[in-house]
Amino acid sequence: MKNVPIVILDFGSQYTQLIARKLRESGVYCEVVPFREDIESIKSKKPQGIILSGGPASVYSPDAYKPSDEIWKLGLPILGICYGMQLITQHFGGEVVPADHHEYGKAKLNIVKSSPIFEGIENDSIVWMSHGDKALSIPQGFEVIATSENSPFAAISNEDAKIYAFQFHPEVHHSTEGVKLLKNFAKHICGCESTWNMGSFAKEKIVDIRKQVGDKKVLCGVSGGVDSSVVAALLHEALPKEQLVCVFVDQGLLRKDETVQVQNMFKMLGMELITIDARDEFIGKLKGVSDPEKKRKIIGETFIEVFDNEAKKHKDVSFLAQGTLYTDVIESVSVKGPSKTIKSHHNVGGLPDWMTFELVEPLREIFKDEVRILGLELGLPKDMIGRHPFPGPGLAIRIMGEVNEEALSLVRESDAIMQSELKSSGYYDKVWQAFTVLLNVSSVGVMGDNRTYDNTVCVRMVESVDGMTATFAHVPHDILEAISRRIINEIDGINRVVYDISSKPPATIEWE
């Protein structure tokens, strides 16, 4: 096993993987493991430092999340964040209690004592608070190194033991110098070097794929999106041509002209692609289904069945490759720690027992923005890498209610108009993701002096970095007006267009 400079113990924060992302941006490799990870497993990684993440629990609860006591005996530098800070405080003899007032949002960090972890950090920088508990007293041997208006113990440390604790979250975007703080811990306190980047990640994954696959064949599920295309490119680099079978399933839930675009892209890359027309099969199984979770499960199960049938046509296919990302994983199921399930993803959770092949998921631990960098590293064209994210269940989860051909036509045509207007206005690359949603809500309208009672389409555009958080895009009104006018004028059955101005959280990016 290779060395892992920083090991992050996950106590359930939705932001845990952002800690890893920020460290990786600084070139420091790290891994996220559950807080309950066996101490021997942690030792085998030969870490130079430990980070304790935030989490939703309270350290004084009877069933509080606690790591192995051996963690404290490793003699390694430790950084605790939010719940991690409270864990450090309690373990070393301080007291943690419920706060009179929960503290959420921005705060100014007042540095009251110099420390290596604050090297290059300006006083009064903005940090992000999100906690309902607080330290009432700090342990002996620790001292306050920073405060905020509402937190007398915003940051504490035991410099001799190299143990540091923040009440705030340096990993989130709103903490303006959070990257520097994490970098200072990794480099100045733990002595880590910047040796990791997407180039090295690609080389490691190619080695991993060859080791996992051996001389067997891999069936690669392709959607035409960024994730599956990058997986296909990685496999193309790692394996001989005869070991890779790329399969594109047209399930009838794709955007306008997408099948032809996918086929042309693979021709350009010099890769063979098998296209399966399964439109009738998918849409038939979705008939009468309105519940979003049922839609996702039906689509996921049908994908697996289609791939399994195709695999039987090829000798020695033992593996299925998928473009699963960490955002899919963290929203679906807690695989690293006790984080809460948001919604299931069709490509997360393993394969059914009746299947005979294993999963290959080389992107499972990285985010969308990192996937794009990896794609460029592998030589994929910029226009393909820059495509907006598209969900595995496709347009099925952009239709509120039953999926049928009429609904698919409405959402597909409205999406095509919106994409066309964004590209012609130069705004396509200025938003992270944009799409339309068919609400299946009818309202009264007037067209040519006649009353109409037609459907409503919602336009959704967001700005994001990794999909974990997002804000609605402030698109100029004239662009929105052009989109609305064209959708209503050119598509029979739609007489109203609305714009979604919710952010994630509390909403998700996709509607289902």
Image: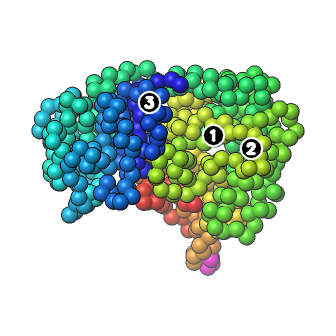
Q: Is residue 463 above or below residue 363?
A: below
State the residue position of label 2.
259
Q: Residues within 10 Å of mark 1 (few under 14, many from 20)?
A: many
Q: Is residue 361 left or right of residue 93?
A: right
Dot 2 or dot 1, earlier in sequence: 2
Secondary structure found at label 3: helix
Q: Is residue 352 left or right of residue 11?
A: right
Residue at 61 percent across and 52 percent down: it is 345
> Where is residue 7 shown, x and y percent of the image?
41, 34
Label 2, label 3: how many angstroms apart (C-alpha)? Answer: 48 Å
Dot 2 or dot 3, earlier in sequence: 3
Secondary structure found at label 2: helix
> Where is residue 391 shown, x and y percent of the image?
61, 50
Residue at 37 percent across and 55 percent down: it is 64
Q: Nearer the viewer, residue 56 or 160?
A: 160
Residue at 80 percent across and 25 percent down: it is 242
Q: Nearer the viewer, mark 2 or mark 3?
A: 3
Give the amino acid type for the residue marked by disc 1 in the picture: Gly
Dot 3 or dot 1, earlier in sequence: 3
Q: Nearer the viewer, residue 339 or 45?
A: 45
> Where is residue 495 shown, x and y percent of the image?
59, 69
Secondary structure found at label 1: loop
State the residue position of label 3.
43
What's the magenta region? 449-453
Give the amino acid type for the residue marked by disc 3 in the picture: Lys
Give the amino acid type for the residue marked by disc 2 in the picture: Thr
Q: Is residue 124 left or right of residue 215?
A: left
State the residue position of label 1.
323
Q: Is residue 331 above or below residue 512?
A: above
